[in-house]
Image (cartoon, grey):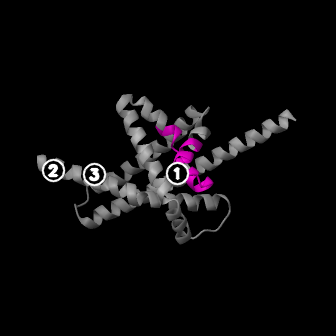
Amino acid sequence: EDGGLKEWSRYFRIQRALQFWIGTIGILGVVHLTVASYRGVRLSASEAFGRAFGSYGSALWVQFLYNLAFVLGLLLLVVPGLVIGVYWYFSLQAIVVHEKSGWQALKHSYQMVKRRWWTFFGRLAVLYLFLFLGIVVLSVPAMFMPETFIFEIIAMILIDLLAAFFIVCFTNLYLMSEREVDEAQVDNIVAAS
């Protein structure tokens, strides 16, 4: 039993490290493709991932700060972790869309969410609920498959594809929310004149 727990712990640490170092590039690439599509620009996958490498340093710094603040907030009492998590959620999108650096991206995400925290919390909660249900739907059949390397790889690929779909959803939420803010600012200027 103790060996199994140690093995699982080691596997989890390796998986988190890979997610941090390699997954960040994947997220940035998907965000670049989503933003290009939203703007009506054709962008190949190789161009998107080439751009992703250009903002890799800022993205790693943001991911580190986000995860640190989120975990510390959760350890403090759960609520601070959720609050920070929602405020800073769109920092990677800010890096891609506005070419912000680490702290600038965190501040940009905070400014966008500020005054609409509950709205974003609700939208993110619904999206994460669907993501969780999708992972459960994909994982349950995997529990009944033989424990072979090929089935594990297939399950991981399917879950990664599902996660990529939700990155597209989160990025579209960011882009639509920014458009709403821009339109509200224009309406305020027109109303004032």
Q: Residue at x 27, y 51 (%)?
A: 12
Q: Is residue 122 magenta?
A: no
The amino acid on which the numbered mark 3 sits, given as a three-letter code, is Phe
The mark tally for this picture is 3
Q: Residue at x 41, y 44 (%)?
A: 67
Residue wearing tag 2: 4
Provide residue 130's location: percent of width, then percent of height: 46, 45
Q: Main secondary structure of the magenta part?
A: helix
Earlier sequence position, callout 1 versus callout 3 = 3
Tell me if mark 2 has few (under 14), some (14-19) or many (20+) residues whose alpha carbon lies within 10 angstroms of its own: few
Type of the residue with mark 1: Leu
Spatial separation of the CA atoms under disc 1 and disc 3: 23 Å
Q: Is residue 100 left or right of residue 129?
A: right
- Residue 91 lies, with reference to residue 23, above or below; the image says above
For residue 137, the mark is none
Q: Earlier in the sequence, mark 1 or mark 2?
A: 2
Q: Would residue 139 be visible to someone looking at this image?
A: yes
Q: Nearer the viewer, residue 75 or 39?
A: 75
Residue with the mark numbered 3: 12
Labels 1, 3: front one: 1
Measuring from the top left, give residue 85's x and y in whole percent. 47, 39
Residue in view at x 44 percent, y 48 percent? 131
Q: Is residue 99 above or below residue 120?
A: below
Q: Amino acid at mark 2?
A: Gly
Range covered by the magenta-colored residues: 85-108
Label 3: which secondary element: helix
Category of crowding for the residue at label 1, using alpha-carbon neighbours closer than 10 angstroms: few (below 14), some (14–19), many (at least 20):
many
Instruction: Identify residue for label 1.
Output: 92
